[in-house]
Image: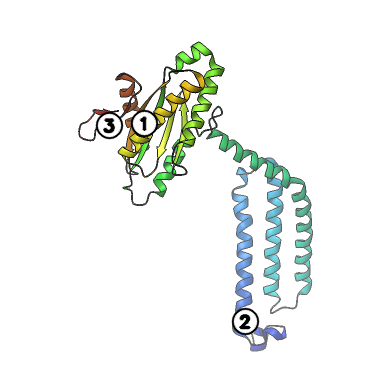
């Protein structure tokens, strides 16, 4: 049977102070559990690490686990004067941490560079390489983020799909390099003439652009589209001596409407603008299905 003196902690700071002893033992045990869990999580997810990162991951796991053993030994020594055990765990931690630091110095720059290149690649995947605008993927992510941020679910936004009329003739007449420069110029023109940061421009493909106008209804959106049409016509005439028209389709939506539906509505309105004579801005008539208003 254990006697009361046997339960008494060693060290004058712990003499008969149950709350203080409990505090230290609880803290050390919780730290050990955390330091045991972290290597366990690393081990479970080791398959996701690259070959270069795996060895460093093992070292980190060993370092963290050895730190946990040190805290467990500290808790043990509240009652037992086994300072050889405590010193041994400290030496193991020192050796593992020293070797980890050496390996970290060797591997970390390459790992950080790999992560940087990965982030750059992900950004490039959302960027149109010709104009520097976001592409269709970046556009979809922006709309999805808009849905997440729209808490009242009733705020109206507008999607404008804009297509250059007669751009194929420009390419056939002046060549694709000229056409590419023209697309870059128009992309920059669009980006400079919409409300930022609440709106953004994307190049969907070819000579088609998408413009997202946040918190914008049909009247304001149609005025924006008309202004952009005039700016593009004036720019193409004065800078490139071209008579370039613009067709556009608008879709008014809130975050309860799916992105597929929004895009389909804008695309139908754009098709109507093209079919009705081009150089028009159209949107669905809210009173009649498959009917459009144009300006």
Task: Look at mark 1 in the image and give the residue it sits on.
Answer: 226
Q: CA distance from mark 2 to mark 1?
A: 75 Å
Q: Earlier in the sequence, mark 1 or mark 3?
A: 1
Q: CA distance from mark 2 to mark 3?
A: 73 Å
Quick check: 285 left or right of 209? left
Nearer the camera: disc 1 or disc 3: 1
Give whichever of 258, 149 is nearer the camera: 149
Nearer the camera: disc 2 or disc 3: 3
Task: Look at mark 3 in the image and give the residue it sits on.
Answer: 284
Where, quadrant-wise, is the N terminus in this rendering? bottom right
Quick check: 32 left or right of 187? right
Residue drawn 50% across the image and 24% down it: 183
Q: Is any atom of residue 136 visible in this view?
A: no
Residue drawn 77% across the image and 49% down it: 105
Residue drawn 42% across the image and 17% down it: 166
Q: What SS does tag 1 mark? A: helix
Spot the residue most to the top: 173
Task: Look at mark 2 in the image and give the residue it sits on.
Answer: 20
Give whichever of 141, 250 is nearer the camera: 250
Callouts 2 and 1 close, C-beta under 8 Å = no
Residue 274 location, quadrant = top left
Q: Earlier in the sequence, mark 2 or mark 3?
A: 2
Q: Percent x, y for residue 204?
A: 45, 29
Q: Earlier in the sequence, mark 2 or mark 1?
A: 2
Callouts 1 and 3 close, C-beta under 8 Å = no
Q: Is residue 228 above or below residue 65?
A: above
Q: CA distance from mark 1 to mark 3?
A: 16 Å
Q: Is any atom of residue 149 visible in this view?
A: yes
Q: What SS does tag 2 mark? A: helix
Callouts 2 and 3 close, C-beta under 8 Å = no
């Amino acid at each position: 049977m254990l006697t009361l003196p046997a339960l008494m902690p060693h060290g004058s700071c712990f003499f008969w102070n149950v709350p203080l002893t409990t505090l230290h033992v609880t803290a050390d045990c919780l730290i050990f559990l955390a330091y045991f869990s972290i290597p366990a999580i690393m081990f479970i997810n080791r398959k996701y690490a690259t070959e270069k990162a795996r060895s460093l991951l093992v070292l980190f796991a060993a370092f963290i686990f050895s730190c946990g053993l040190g805290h467990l030994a500290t808790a043990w020594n509240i009652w037992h004067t086994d300072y050889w055990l405590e010193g041994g765990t400290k030496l193991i931690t020192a050796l593992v941490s020293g070797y980890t630091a050496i390996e970290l110095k060797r591997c970390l720059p390459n790992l950080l560079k790999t992560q940087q290149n990965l982030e750059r690649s992900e950004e490039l995947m959302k960027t149109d390489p010709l104009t520097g605008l976001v592409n269709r993927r970046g556009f979809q992510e922006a709309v999805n983020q808009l849905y997440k941020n729209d808490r009242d679910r009733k705020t109206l936004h507008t999607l404008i799909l804009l297509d250059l009329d007669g751009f194929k003739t420009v390419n056939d007449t002046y060549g694709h390099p000229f056409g590419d420069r023209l697309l870059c110029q128009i992309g920059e023109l669009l980006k400079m003439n919409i409300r930022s940061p609440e709106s953004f421009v994307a190049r969907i493909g070819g000579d088609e652009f998408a413009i997202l106008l946040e918190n914008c209804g049909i009247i304001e959106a149609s005025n924006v589209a008309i202004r952009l049409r005039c700016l593009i016509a004036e720019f193409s005439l004065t800078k490139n001596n071209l008579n370039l028209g613009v067709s556009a389709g608008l879709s008014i939506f809130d975050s309860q409407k799916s992105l597929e539906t929004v895009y389909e509505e804008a695309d139908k309105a754009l098709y109507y603008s093209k079919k009705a004579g081009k150089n028009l801005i159209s949107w669905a008539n809210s009173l009649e299905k498959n009917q459009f208003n144009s300006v």
